[in-house]
Image (cartoon, rainbow, N blue to C red):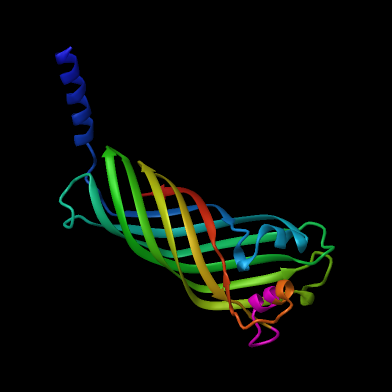
Amino acid sequence: MKKATFTVFLILASIISFGQYLDNQFYFRFGYSSPSWKQFGMEEQDWNDLGITSKAGANFELGSIFMLKRIINRNDMALGINVDYLYTVFHNFENEDDVNGGSLGVLRAGSKIGPSLTYSPVDKLEFDVYTKLDCAWATGAVIYYSDMIDDAEDFFLGTVDFGFSTGLNIRYGVLMLGVEFNTISSELESDDYPGVYLQQFVDAEFSDNLGSEKKSKLPCTNFTIGLSF
């Protein structure tokens, strides 16, 4: 019995000792982005009152993880800097019948950077946890109507807005899976009426008051799959 226990222990210790020496990673990934019903400070019922009952999204990221191996002197663990050189995310809140109003599409492009911690319990399997500063270089929103001409659409644009994201990656070989919660706020200014913001329209709709708030909260959760080298 003791020999069997010792053998099992030795095998487990050997497996753990085979954790790979962590190297820098370059990755690209894409997936499903789930916009929160709480975007624009609203609730699901508020969207439903506007005739919007469905939402969906997609995202793409291109980035690297730079391992700072000298900080933690272990082969199976490393602190790092996680950089997304470019990301894009699109969200759509759809009014399926256009009776009560238009649908809303939001497109954002930016970059992210922050610290990460990588752990490799066995060879080829790695876990990354991270938090990043999110810089949105540009955010665009459009209220569109399927039964109206293009010049009837309302456009809003925001530039250089900041937020944060936290997430987890699971990597095995070159395969990379990830989940990330992202929170950012953007000042979306009307293209037709400078100085007027989309959030003011939202506040006026639900509080009967054209408020002074300019920033729109745009939280979402991203689920991704990609390749890491």
The residue at the far bottom in this view is: 194
Depth check: give the residue in front, 134 or 88: 134
Residue depicted at x 39% and y 63% = 132
Q: Is residue 182 left or right of residue 228?
A: right
Residue 51: which quarter of the image?
A: bottom right
Residue 93: x %, y % from top left: 68, 60
Residue 204: x %, y % from top left: 71, 77
Residue 39: which quarter of the image?
A: bottom right
| Visible residue check, residue 24 | yes
Depth check: give the residue in front, 226 or 164: 164
Residue depicted at x 77% and y 66% = 102
Residue 125: which quarter of the image?
A: top left
The residue at the far top in this view is: 1
Q: Quadrant of the N terminus?
A: top left
Q: Is residue 92 left or right of residue 72?
A: right
- Eyeballing the image, is 162 above or below 98? below
- In the image, the segment drawn in magenta is 192-203
- Eyeballing the image, is 74 above or below 40? above
Q: Is residue 176 left or right of residue 50?
A: left
What is the count of numbered marks?
A: 0
| Visible residue check, residue 174 | no
- Eyeballing the image, is 8 above or below 93? above
Residue 73: x %, y % from top left: 15, 51
Residue 20: x %, y % from top left: 24, 41
User: Magenta stretch containing residue 91, yes or no?
Assistant: no
Residue depicted at x 65% and y 65% = 42
Residue depicted at x 40% and y 50% = 168
- Eyeballing the image, is 113 above or below 172? below
